[in-house]
Image (cartoon, rainbow, N blue to C red):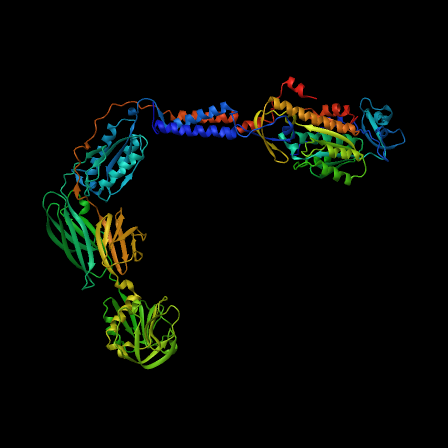
Amino acid sequence: MAAEPLLDRDFLERLERLTIHWQKSFAGLVGGHNASRFAGPGQEFLDHRNFHHGDDLRAVNWRAYLRLEKLFLKMFQVEPRVPVRMLVDLSASMTAHGGVKFDYARKLAAALCYVGLVRLDSIEIHGLTNRLSQRILSTGGRHRIPSVMDALAALEPGGRTDYLAVVREFISMYSQRGVVIILSDFLDDAGCEKALQYLADFGHELMLLQLWAEEDRTPPWLGELDLRDAETGAALKVDFDEEARMRYTRAFDEYADSLQRLALRSGGRYAGISTTQPLESVIFGDLIKMRGIA
Amino acid sequence: MYFLNLSLFQFLAIFGSISAVSVALYLLDRSRRRQVVSTLRFWVSAEHPSVVARRRRIQQPWSLVLQLISMALLLLAIAQLRFGAPEAAGRDHILLLETSAWMGARSGNRTLMDIARDRARQYLRALPARDRVMLVRADALATPVTAFEPDRRKLEAAIDTAAPGSAALNLQEVLGFARRLQQQGGRHAGEIAFIGAGRTAELDPTVELPRNLRFIAVPDAIENAGLRKIGMRRSNDDADLWEVYVSARNYGTRPRTVNIALDYGPPGDQGRVPAASRRVTLQPGADSEQTFELRTRAAVVLGVTLTPHDAFAADDHAMLEVPAQPLLPVTVYSEQPELLKPLLAATSRVVAVYKKPSEYVSNEKGLVVLDRFAPPQRPQTDSLWIDPPAGASPIPVRTTVQQVPFSRWNTADPIAAGLRTKEYKLDQASVFETAPGDIQIGAVEAGPVIVARPDKPRIVVFGFHPALSGMRYELATPLLFANLLRWYAPELFRRSELSGGSVGAVKLALDQPAAASDVRVLREDGTPLPFVLRDRAIHFFSGTPGVVRVLAGDREYVNSLSLPEVGETKWQPPVEVRRGIPRALPLVPAAGEIWPWLALAGAAGLLAEWLLFGRFRRGRQGPRRPVRIRTAEREAVRR
């Protein structure tokens, strides 16, 4: 029996009118926005997609409409493109609390990949632990989404996170600047702010998608706890009460704020995503609101 | 209310220990919830994280209470909590039913065993229904037939299967066993009821009898005389003559005149031949020993019968298997057989045949003697080579010497044991080259001239002819041949002693000292029987009739244990011992068994605790159903 796909067809169809957005101008590349992807007549035809409300009527393939009585939109290729890279956190902390964060990250990555594939963007996906691992290339149009989803579903989590080492490896591997989407809980004991700042300073545009399980932000347990870090195995014994829980949540929120400030300060974007939120509301709500996609 | 299996102090001690362990485990382990989290940074950075050095309070008091209640219920079940007074509870009785050989004696048209079974059933009916009874067969040993059993039908079925054995009653051993059984039992001890005739070995008067002993006598006013022991051994003067000893005893109170008759023949009643008969008067309580002679070389079965028969016929007849006289066939190949005939004729168990060397065949049986003759093919059996040709000797000849004095015997070896000769010369002798393992029997200065090779088949080689040398005048010559024959066929000279006795403990006095490693005690089927060798006597026990064979050096003792063992004295219990069948007690309904319900309740409590508080629940529901903080709190900490 085949494994259930990460995303169903209906949801994917709703993603077709979206596109990944970036703000920076990259040297030698089309910059500022990606409206030029929809250049007027005379550009190289790429593909058709279903017509959605709000699409430019000038791009409708009327011949197809006359034959099929269905609106199709013509798409044209614009070269060169901005490289889009995505880092998906595979560390053991993502598997804590039943692995909800890891599952959510894979689904979100698959959705963003589909958005990119529809626009014929190439997205390189890397696993993120203490190094870059498990590279997946998402390219070639929407019909490649099944193989991308299979590859995402086959990702194996485990290990510790080391953002500094990963950023060093990333910069040495990709000298061409571009958009870097990071799907992670950003729970590196050594701190990830410095590494992310380093990445932004190098010229990449950051899109930080911080995922957390409800237990990460608001621990449901009370009393005497014997805690164990999922990544390092370090243990801590605490007496946890309501007051301590409030302090904990406050510290978590402060950390999320610091990540957001870092992203905005460096011209990037940030979204904090709870795994209890429906994926659809995140994509059509939070990500559009922060102008990560449009 | 009382406990059947534990005292109140024991119950409280055990429950206190269990409670202490449970509370300690809760404080040490159970109250601390283990949780894997994504990171520890917010726990540490939260203001004033309380690092707990040791447990101060129990986090799940209801779980602990439920566990303690469940354990208390289980402990109550183990202790067998009963309502009412302890005296109303059932007791455990031990019923010793005598199954000695004497119980096979007839009294009227019934055996004593039948009467004892009736008494046992009557005793069971007289006991309250809640009492449990263990049935023990009592003869030389005490053998439990049932556990402490409340079911009377099972007990009666076990009583029906009880049958007389072959051993005598050992009342002291049986009573001691019953007392130990009752001391180990958890319930209130009831009576030790002995049902039997009480004919036993002498009781040690210093041994205290159980206070709860009840003696239910089986009347046995029976006049009996019987065989006690039979012994057979070969006469020292005549190998074909057996000396037979018969011992009989009058167990009754009046003198009896009996006839002791011997017959022999094949097993069974057919074809038997009377051998001897003697009329003897046996005094009350006295033994009489009679000696008979029986001449036979063949294997027969000797029967000894005491007539007229009485009410206990089992000890009136005994049979002994008499083994055949073993013979050694010897084939002598010689041109001068008259030289060897005197040496071989000296032993009556040797059957010698003399043949010419030209008649030689290699597949003779027994022993082959080759006198100055080398056959074309070696004998397949044991052989004695006398002065063989130098080139054909089975043991290589190193050299030939002439006119040399015989120098020594190897008296350390059984073949030359006890040999001593004056100095004499050998006109001509072959000196042999021995191999490892060869035994040098006799030697001259140049080397061995008589050599034995103990491999199969055995070989002895003489380098000279004993009858054609100075040795023929020596006394050592026939002794050497006798030793050689014993070496070739030790079973030929094994002395057999047969005895017929009764089963049970047997003490066998040895004629000569023997090491325990040289002694073997074997059953009829050849399996070894444990024994003790003490003071030149072998002690062993056989509980079933049969033949026990004892091998000690060159002696063989065959014990045919077919006679029943009868106790010599009749036990008279002291006056304080209760007697007879007790009066039937009114039936009191037994208290209901509540321990199964207690055990079930305890198990249910533990199961409920596991479902409500166990890790099973925490593991399943913890991450799935997080406790949500109140909205006001959430708003307070939200950005």
Which of these two is toward me, A63 or B228?
B228
Lateral position of residue B468 relative to residue A243, left or right:
left
Q: Is residue B162 visible?
A: no
Q: Is residue A236 above or below residue B520?
A: above
Residue B582 in the image: x percent, y percent?
Answer: 21, 28
Q: Is residue B241 visible?
A: yes
Q: Quadrant of the C terminus of chain B?
A: top right
Q: Tell me what residue is drawn at x 48 percent, y 27 percent.
A: B607
Which of these two is toward me, B537 or B274?
B537
Q: Please identify the residue farthest to the right as the structure is shown.
A: A42
Q: Quadrant of the N terminus of chain B?
A: top left
Which quarter of the picture shows residue B134? top left
Q: Tell me what residue is drawn at x 68 percent, y 21 percent.
A: B638
Residue A41 in the image: x percent, y percent?
Answer: 89, 29
Q: Is residue B463 above or below residue B98?
A: below
Which of these two is toward me, B214 or B95?
B214
Q: How many marks?
A: 0
Which quarter of the picture shows residue B415? bottom left
Lateral position of residue B571 relative to residue A175, left or right:
left
Q: Please identify the residue farthest to the top as the structure is shown.
A: B632
Residue B191 in the image: x percent, y percent?
Answer: 25, 31
Which quarter of the picture shows residue A286? top right
Lateral position of residue B220 relative to residue B179, left or right:
left
Which of these two is toward me, A73 or B529?
B529
Residue A28 in the image: x percent, y percent?
Answer: 86, 35
